[in-house]
Every structure is written in structure tokens, then in C-alpha cells.
Image (tube, grey):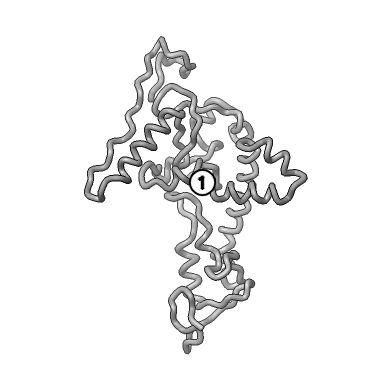
Amino acid sequence: TDCAICLCPLEEEGVKVIELTCGHRWHSECLKEQLQHSQPSHSKRLLFNGCQCAKCGLFCDHQELDHLTRKIDGLREKVSKLIVDQLQVDACDAWKRSESDPKERSDLMRQAQRNYAFYLCSNCKDPYFGGNIECADQEEGELAPQDRLCVACSPQSQTICEQPLQHRSHLIWKCRYCCQPSSFLCYGSVHFCDSCHERNSHRLKERQRGSRNSPAPPSLEPLACPGDSCSFPKPVGQTSHKN
């Protein structure tokens, strides 16, 4: 039998083999290297598939791997709680109906796990909801790690609410590129209205249709605030929005 990571025989002389609680066996060093590469990063959205047994999909569990899986297990638990919080906002009625239907609730959780993107806050180091995976997986638009901040750590949210984490479902954010209220959260911290989200999606599709040598499309152009004639509220002491 071979190690499914390095494809070398498991019973090589001098090579340590460990058996996970799921019953599958691997070279100890191969599995440790895989788990090391799968540690969470502030530069990308949280992914846990590298921490699973490649043969059955169960999460790796072995005493010898605790120093590599303990942090990930804690993050997975926090992300599950965030999924519940977000579903109560995005699918409130369906979530309430599922109280008496375990299968429907399980289906809602699985769908959310496939669709939601989560990131590590660069300040408090906790995970936070950052939009939809469809946007997160785009090649362009990712924020710098230092700009990935959860609602509780964001300076903008702290200026408008004393308890932004508890009240996050009631906060309405302005689109980054115009004066309209946002309806999309993408890339971890970027808010878009419907129109600007569509403009950005079109821009990225143009990039994907081009060849590798094609020049990248320009950044999304912000729409200037009309000033006094703008009907949306402005920050105190300002006569226009900074889009």
C-alpha cells in the first residue's frame, strides 16, 4: 500500500506511519507537511479542505498532529457559529422553519458552507463573514492582509455604533464606489451596491476572457458624489461622499 500523498510505499524502512481515527494510514511527515501548508492565512479566505483525510474527507485526528490541528479545529467551530448567525439574516424564514426539520437545517448549513467566504481578521485574529465565495474566488480584488478587519475591529463601524459586533445585522453600509447603500459584501471587506457589483463582475469577466498576456482591465471607476443634490446622508462636517 502506498502513501496517497507522496505515492511511495507506506512500509518503507525508517519511515514513520500514523493511522488517523478514520482508519486511514499515511506517512507521518507527509501528513504533517500537508497540514503545515493548510494553516490559515490572512491573505486568503479560510479553507479547511487541506486538513481533511484525502481518502474519506473526515478531518485529520491524531495525537501526534494536535499541534497542527488544534488551531484549525477552533476556527472551524467559530466559523460554524458565524454561519448560523449569517443564515439567520440571509434566510431567516427558512432557518425558523428548519427548527423542526433536522434535515432541512443540515441542508442549509451545507449550502452555506459551499457559498459563504470567511476570513481571518488581521487585528483580533478571529474569523469573520466576508461575502460570497463566487466573488472571493475571483483572481482580482483581494484586499491586503492588513485591510482585512472584522466588524468589531473596523474603524468605520466603531464610529457609527458602540457595539458593532452585536448590531452588525442592522448596520447599512455605503457602496465603496458610489453613494448608494450596499447590498453585497465581497473580498472580505468591500461593499458594493447592485449596480457597482454588476459593473465589477463585468470587468472581471472581461479579464477572464482575455489571454494571459492581455493588459488587466482598469480598476473599477468610482462614481462622483453630486454633493448637495445627493439624497443620501453624509458624514458629519462633509458636503459629499468620498467614493
Task: Judge by depth and name the residue closer to the eye, 204 or 229.
Answer: 204
Task: Return the x and y of residue 20 as percentages of the image width and height.
Answer: 60, 73
Residue visible at 46% across and 73% down in the picture = 5
Where is mark 1, residue-wise?
Answer: 117
Task: Judge by depth and name the residue closer to the eye, 71 or 111.
Answer: 111
* Lateral position of residue 105 relative to residue 27, left or right: right
Secondary structure under the numbered disc 1 in the rendered image: strand
Compared with 46, 58 (above or below) is below
Which residue lies most toward the bottom here? 13
Residue visible at 50% across and 30% down in the picture = 183
Task: Return the x and y of residue 4 as percentages of the image width and height.
Answer: 48, 75
Task: Return the x and y of residue 193 as percentages of the image width and height.
Answer: 46, 28
Compared with 204, 39 (above or below) is below
Residue visible at 42% across and 28% down in the picture = 195
Task: Return the x and y of residue 152 as percentages of the image width and height.
Answer: 56, 37
Compared with 59, 14 (above or below) is below
User: Which three-letter amino acid code belongs to the residue tagged 1?
Assistant: Ala
Which residue lies most toward the right here? 100
| Mark 1 Cα-neighbour bin, 10 Å: few <14, some 14–19, many ≥20 | many
Residue visible at 61% across and 68% down in the picture = 61
Compared with 181, 106 (above or below) is below
